[in-house]
Amino acid sequence: MSLSPLLIRLGEHPPDAIAVSGAGGARTSYGALARAADAATVALRAQGVGPGDTVAFLVDPGPLYVEVLLAIWRAGAIAVPLSPLHAVPELAHVVENAAPMALIASGLLAPRLTGMRSPLTGQESLGAEALVAFPTAGAGSPRLPGLPPADADALMLYTSGTTGRPKGVRLSHAALAATVASLEQAWRWRRDDRLLHVLPLHHTHGLIVALLGALWAGAETRCQPFDAAAVWSALADASVFMAVPTVYTKLMQAFDAAPSEARASWAAGARGLRLATSGSAALPATLLEAFRQATGQIILERYGMTEIGMALSNSYDGPRVPGAVGRELPGVTVDIVDDAGRPVPAGEPGELRVRTPQMFSGYHGDAAATAASFDGEGRFLTGDTGTRDAGGVVRLLGRTSIDIIKSGGYKLSALEIEAVLLDHPAVAEVAVVGVPDDTWGERVSAWVVARGAASPTLADLQAFARERLAPYKLPRALELVPALPRNAMGKVQKQRLRSP
């Protein structure tokens, strides 16, 4: 039986090599990481966690996050990362939907889960710090289990879909390994790499592409909160940097506003990068060129989704095409087809449909949605429209569904945001649409029909939604309209709102 390639690979790295560092200087080696994960595994087993169970955890980026993640996997369970950026109702939705056997939280974040209990056991959250310090020997102490099989589910990430509420995407150990092994080959990951990590760890880009990519290679990951000036300074001691277009925009805004001495120092430090990548949203060609002029670095763009891992990438060694996401990664097939599923000619737009060994296992508890995500030939329906040139390079044109907004590197559901805004007493009707924006990729914009004589302001809606949604989901623009445009069937015609 094939066992978890990720856990096997982690055991092969030099135990004294630094694996992860975090805020405040905390850092751990691969050997210490394994020992702490083993202790937490024993603690989880003592709590009754076993193969196939789900375990949700809320931990800040850094060594403790990785120790808890690995412990969940060593126990044979499925890890469900919770985001410190999410509002309490959003956290509660994930906990209720995932029905975890156990909840784990680090000390400073534990209050965010106050009142929440595991739907399966009724327990409140376990302390992450106590888990990694759990004694691994002694009378009655559970023994470490064997490694989980490669085809067992390892991870469940919540991503927005057309239903309006985030769905749990289940990914196996084999699928995760296929993703990071493919990127190791394509992007030349090395053990002496130092990844500067500023991305959230509850979605594919930050967790799988960045963190697991570095761990797979035996490299060092340095986690730090995003602050433009601090990131510029830290680039001098990094070899790999991964970000979304919004991060690069904010870096260039800080660069342009800085004194000449700081710009010279920052640019010199960034020139030492081996690789700088961008994903999760389209990177404007003007931004790529501005960063190149400042640092000499040509950002590498790629394309993927939670359900399919990484599918396309610009070349590491060869030319990188501005505004394009490159060619298929090893083992991946991408077809660009018309509405009938037939291939379109080079240069013609069509939907991207994908076959890959990185494919998700399914949407948690939603077999119907899983089945509807594939066509009759077993290809995943990405919902993205693009073209392929005669040389095989793919360029994205946008989302097939206007109800999915890509803003600041996040994939947001317009329907979820609408549902929250409709609860505002001054809102009778609302339509949320992503409008093109140089900084955010797409700006979350709301068209509102007011209730009665009341006229809500943008600040009113933001304050109301802030208690229910993550900050990056808040509307950033508001239009008050007498009525929403609808078709003969009563459906809101959002494309008319988005059109100038």
Image (cartoon, rainbow, N blue to C red):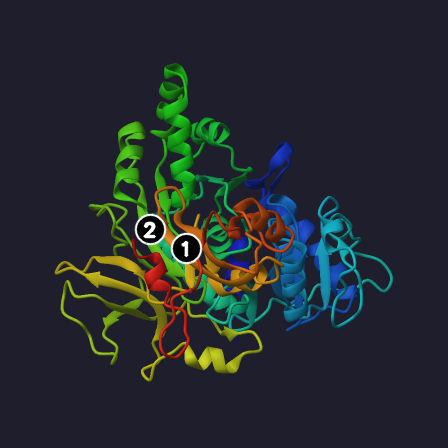
Which disc, if any, is residue 406? 1
At x 58%, y 54%, the residue is 454
The residue lying toward the viewer, choosing from 464 and 34, is 464
Q: From the viewer's perspective, is 439 left or right of 392?
A: right
Q: From the viewer's perspective, is 332 left or right of 451?
A: left
At x 66%, y 59%, the residue is 89
Residue 32, visible in the rendered structure: no
- Alpha carbon separation for disc pair 2 and 1: 9 Å
x and y, in percent, of residue 266 in the image: 40, 24
x and y, in percent, of residue 373 in the image: 41, 76
Single out the residue that lies furthest toward the right: 139
Q: How many marks?
A: 2
The residue under label 2 is: 282
Q: Return the disc, 2 or 1, that comes first in the chain's sequence.
A: 2
Residue 185, visible in the rendered structure: yes
Q: Is residue 436 above or below residue 494?
A: above
Q: Secondary structure at mark 1?
A: strand
Q: Is residue 279 above or below residue 198?
A: below
Q: Secondary structure at mark 2?
A: loop
At x 31%, y 29%, the residue is 295
Q: Amino acid at mark 1?
A: Lys
Q: From the viewer's perspective, is 238 left or right of 167?
A: left
Q: From the viewer's perspective, is 124 left or right of 398?
A: right
Give the class, few, some or many, for how many residues have Cα within 10 Å of label 2's Cα (few <14, many ≥20).
Answer: many
Single out the residue that lies furthest toward the top: 261
The residue lying toward the viewer, choosing from 449 and 123, is 449
